[in-house]
Image (spheres, rainbow, N blue to C red):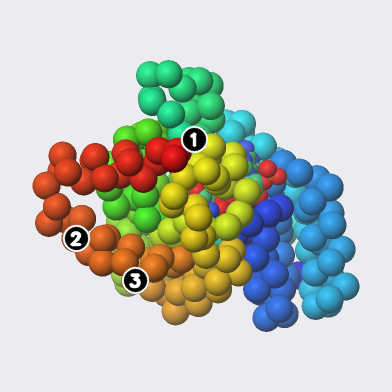
Amino acid sequence: MRNIALITGASSGIGKALATIHAKTGGDLIIVARSKDKLDALKEDLEEKYGCEVKVIVKDLTQPNAPKEIFETILEEKIAINYLINNAGFGGRGKFHERDWHDDHNMIQLNIVALTALCRYFLPRFVDRNEGRILNVSSTASLMAGPMQAVYFATKAYVTSFSNAIAEELHDTNVTVTALLPGATDTGFAKTADMDKTALFKEAFSAEEVAQTGYDAMLAGELEVLAGVSFAQKAMMKAVPLTPKKILLKQVRKMQEVD
Ligand SMILES: NC(=O)c1ccc[n+]([C@@H]2O[C@H](COP(=O)([O-])OP(=O)(O)OC[C@H]3O[C@@H](n4cnc5c(N)ncnc54)[C@H](OP(=O)(O)O)[C@@H]3O)[C@@H](O)[C@H]2O)c1
């Protein structure tokens, strides 16, 4: 295998689009998710269309040992990855005290713990080789607190903060860490998060467009990039630090509500 990208959550949405973009460049892939059938179908499709090599790892990343098992599998096969793309993640709507704690616990495990663990396992190898790129899929949700999606927004605040911080720690190496901050994107995410009937998702951007922006930013070694955000939303993001917190919280709550 050569020019290898390890992509979590590659069975659908932004992750699948990232895998396709990487395959088109001629790179090989290790694709991770729970849905074996979808990963196998993607492997067959990408190998046939682009002549690349795709390895499938079926793993539930909410399981505490999953990141270590992925790392050890790759180590055993003496594969050196070039790109680590932590994309798998999910959200969930509702008042925090009424939501199923098991779901929120799994969200923290996937969005935060698995992403951090995979960075921790692979980064020392990137630093030893003085090459490698990490793309962590965060969200515009990381830029504010999110009433009605309190845990999800907080997990993404962690992802952006953590990614920015380790990017700076690596300033004297050729290893880069990029945070991708998508806005509403047309994938399976909205349905899983119970957000598909909100105003926010009426004008969602395509997964392909968002993935391309993230992939290009990763190659360029950018610190972070917004994607799938309208002009009006961009203006709102810029105003976040200037908006009184109570007003902002009310605005965000209303955006999560169903008509
Ligand atoms: N869509 C949006 O509007 C939006 C906006 C901002 C940020 N994001 C972020 O973008 C990323 C990708 O989401 P998406 O929009 O492409 O949604 P998606 O279509 O639902 O894709 C989520 C991916 O994560 C995988 N996944 C979920 N739970 C997993 C688990 N326990 N273990 C391993 N893999 C798991 C899913 O595969 P399996 O089900 O096969 O496991 C799937 O491949 C997420 O981090 C999300 O937070 C999305």
Farthest residue to the front: give it.
259
Q: Residues within 10 Å of mark 1 (few under 14, many from 20)?
A: many
Which mark is in front, 3 or 2? 3
Determine which residue is flagged by label 1.
Answer: 92
Q: Is residue 156 above or below residue 109?
A: below
Checking the image for residue 62, the label placed there is: none
Crowdedness near tag 2: few (<14), some (14–19) or many (≥20) residues, C-alpha within 10 Å:
few
Name the kind of residue labelled 3 in the image.
Answer: Phe
Kind of element beneath mark 1? loop
Quarter of the image where the N terminus is located: bottom right
Type of the residue with mark 1: Gly
| Residue 258 appearing in the image | yes
Q: Can you identify the residue that label 3 sits on?
A: 231
Between discs 1 and 2, the one toward the N terminus? 1
SS state under label 3: helix
Which residue type does callout 2 highlight?
Ala
Q: Which residue is mark 2?
A: 239
Q: Nearer the viewer, residue 125 or 184?
A: 184
